[in-house]
Amino acid sequence: MPLIPDLPWTATDIGSGPGVVYVTHLHLRRLRDVPAFLRDSRAIRTQTMASPGARSLMLRAQPLARRFTTVSWWDDEPSARAFVRTDPHRAAMRRWRPGMQDFRNRVLPGIAGEVPTVSASVARAASAG
């Protein structure tokens, strides 16, 4: 059970096709990095909400465990790739890479009209291998 509620965001127009879902697991090495990581996460959340092709974003934070999971839903992979190549996301990932104990990213097909949840997306990613 997360210590803080999941932080959801869904666009007013989620498009008509299935899109793609990105499930990302991030595990920090040090507990003292959690506050700065959460600040960067808020900036990236704001970036996502303004990004073309973004449909939804969920952040599950387990700060005392230093574990974070994001689930983002995009119109297509080019939209998601454009997002990750843009600051503040790009700069944050470069900054945090050395501080990660574990980083995993999985891309799944979306389901048309169904906003992905963290729990369902994590389960789908695990069953997909």
Image (cartoon, helix red, strand yellow):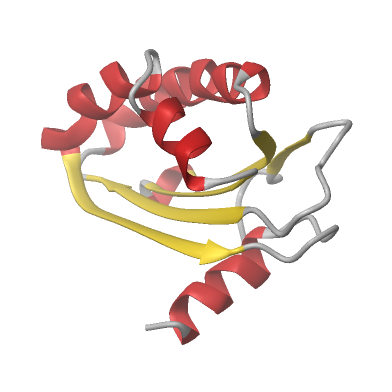
Q: Closer to the camera, 61 or 80?
A: 80
Q: In this image, 123 relative to 35: left or right?
A: right
Q: Position of residue 54 (x, y in %)?
A: 65, 34
Check the image and report above or below for 85 versus 5: above
Q: Residue at 59% across / 25% down in the picture?
A: 48
Residue 61 shows in this picture: no
Check the image and report above or below for 1 versus 125: above
> Split into 4 quadrants, where in the image is the C terminus?
bottom left
Check the image and report above or below for 128 versus 110: below
> Split into 4 quadrants, where in the image is the N terminus?
bottom right
Q: Closer to the camera, 70 or 84?
A: 84
Number of marks in picture: 0
Quarter of the image where one finds residue 118: bottom right
Q: Residue at 33% across / 24% down in the picture?
A: 85
Q: Position of residue 9 (x, y in %)?
A: 75, 35
Q: Residue at 76% across / 55% down in the picture?
A: 17
User: In this view, which residue lies farthest toward the left?
Assistant: 98
Q: In this image, 53 relative to 85: left or right?
A: right
Residue 82 shows in this picture: yes
Q: Residue at 41% across / 23% down in the picture?
A: 35
Quarter of the image where one finds residue 33: top left
Q: Position of residue 52 (x, y in %)?
A: 63, 24
Q: In this image, 50 relative to 37: left or right?
A: right
Q: Closer to the camera, 66 or 76?
A: 76
Quarter of the image where one finds residue 110: bottom right
Q: Position of residue 71 (x, y in %)?
A: 57, 51
